[in-house]
Image (tube, rainbow, N blue to C red):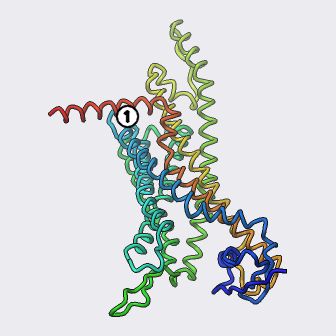
């Protein structure tokens, strides 16, 4: 029988328990937990390699992948802004306003996500003599969290606007440009205010300087702040982690399904209505009244460019909605997983073999789930442009046209 090795951790939580197991000598079969309970490593032998792989993913693979996605996201957001803001693109005020806000928010997310990931994963930001590193991590965490929620809320507003314009066309199109302008401003201001709720996450941390003397540089540590245990922290955590994601998810699904149904119905009805109208016109007969579903669209029968533009707008909105829905599903899944599995192992739990094993399994599952959620969020913030380029012919042609114009402009400047 191999001798056991005793390693005492400061706290009896899953992460520290795994560190005890990983850092123990290979020829030892047991580990003494902080509670004094002797835990047999064979209880989690089948999860050991899964935990080691999750560590490598969290430290190396995932950060590199997130930075690469952020770079592609920055390029994509810039390309969207160049294309959408040009005067030749759709002049629909609400659509352009929400698209510009969404792309700008994604751009901010990706720009600040790069230093956040780099400093939080590849450097020691807690226990460093450089205070700038610790403060940069917290500041970029604030910006990334706010930009993320703002993007989700703006996507919902864009989907809601399309839903209203299709379900209540006479009401929506009878509003003047000034009314729609204030609608966009109000919606974006509300989004910005609600996005600040996500500050609850970085505000639970603070920076402390310890060990500083006249001859010794102090070390700066990131620790939990007093805000973490307050009622406001719990309320905002509940709102941001489950209430808002679940609300956005349900609303997005409802608006998307309703919009798809109306669009498909109109595509079936319009050809027959157009044929009937043409036959009445050719026969010199007054056209019969049209239904509320098709009247507004039939007025544009002789404007194929406008119909093509509307189809393109629908496609852009559906692409955005699909990514947002996937992201909200990931948020919701992670919250329910944490709720069902619990948070920490108490000192008393360390005396129970089955409960300790369950908590260690839960920690590994949480690491993989959090990694998948982070990956999904980075994909959501990075891939809008590439989806638009793939699925929207109008956006693709406009983007190519803008790039050609930029090339000509740059070449002309170089000549002079």
Instruction: Give the x, y percent position of residue 38.
Output: 79, 84
Total tally of numbered discs in the picture: 1
Q: Is residue 416 left or right of residue 410?
A: left
Residue located 55% across and 71% down the image: 236
Q: Quick check: 96 above or below 292? A: below
Which of the image's four quarters has the C terminus?
top left
Residue 106 at x, y = what percent? Answer: 45, 52
Which residue in the rendered view is the most extreme toward the left? 416
Q: Is residue 180 visible?
A: no
Mark 1: which secondary structure?
A: loop
Q: Is residue 2 left or right of residue 190?
A: right
At horizontal 46% and vertical 22% (from top left) the residue drawn is 304
Which residue is pictured at 60% across the width and 65% down the height?
241
Left or right of residue 355, residue 140 in this image? left
One can see residue 177 in this view = yes
- Seen in the picture, residue 5 relative to 287 is either above or below; the reply is below
């Amino acid at each position: 029988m191999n001798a056991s090795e005793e390693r005492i951790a400061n706290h009896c939580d899953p992460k520290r328990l795994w560190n005890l197991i990983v850092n123990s000598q290979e020829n030892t079969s047991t580990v003494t937990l902080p509670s004094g309970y002797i835990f047999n490593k064979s209880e989690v032998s089948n999860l050991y390699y899964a935990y080691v792989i999750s560590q490598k993913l969290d430290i190396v693979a995932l950060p590199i992948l997130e930075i690469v996605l952020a770079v592609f996201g920055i390029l994509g957001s810039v390309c969207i802004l160049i294309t959408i803001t040009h005067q030749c693109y759709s002049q629909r005020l609400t659509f352009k306003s929400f698209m510009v806000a969404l792309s700008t928010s994604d751009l901010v997310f990706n720009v600040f996500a790069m230093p956040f990931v780099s400093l939080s994963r590849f450097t020691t930001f807690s226990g460093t003599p450089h205070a700038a590193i610790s403060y940069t991590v917290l500041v970029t965490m604030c910006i990334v969290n706010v930009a993320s929620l703002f993007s989700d809320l703006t996507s919902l507003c864009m989907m809601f606007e399309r839903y209203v314009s299709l379900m209540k066309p006479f009401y929506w199109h009878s509003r003047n440009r000034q009314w729609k302008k204030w609608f966009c401003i109000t919606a974006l201001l509300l989004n910005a205010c609600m996005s600040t709720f996500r500050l609850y996450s970085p505000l639970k941390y603070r920076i402390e300087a310890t060990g500083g003397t006249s001859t010794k540089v102090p070390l700066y540590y990131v620790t939990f702040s007093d805000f973490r245990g307050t009622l406001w922290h719990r309320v905002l955590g509940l709102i941001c982690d489950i209430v808002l994601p679940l609300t956005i998810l349900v609303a997005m699904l409802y608006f998307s399904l309703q919009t798809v149904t109306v669009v498909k119905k109109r595509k079936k009805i319009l050809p027959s209505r157009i044929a009937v109208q043409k036959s009445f016109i050719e026969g010199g007969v007054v056209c019969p009244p049209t239904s509320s579903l098709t009247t507004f669209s039939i007025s544009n029968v002789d404007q194929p460019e406008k119909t093509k533009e509307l189809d393109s707008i629908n496609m852009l909105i559906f692409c955005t909605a699909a990514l947002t829905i996937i992201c909200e599903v990931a948020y919701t899944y992670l919250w329910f997983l944490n709720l069902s599995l619990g948070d920490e192992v108490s000192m008393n739990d360390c005396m129970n073999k089955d409960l300790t094993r369950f908590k260690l399994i839960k920690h590994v599952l949480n690491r993989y789930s959090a990694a998948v959620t982070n990956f999904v969020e980075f994909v959501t913030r990075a891939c809008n442009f590439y989806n638009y380029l793939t699925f929207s012919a109008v956006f693709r042609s406009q983007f190519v046209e803008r790039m050609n114009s930029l090339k000509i402009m740059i070449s002309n400047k170089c000549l002079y």
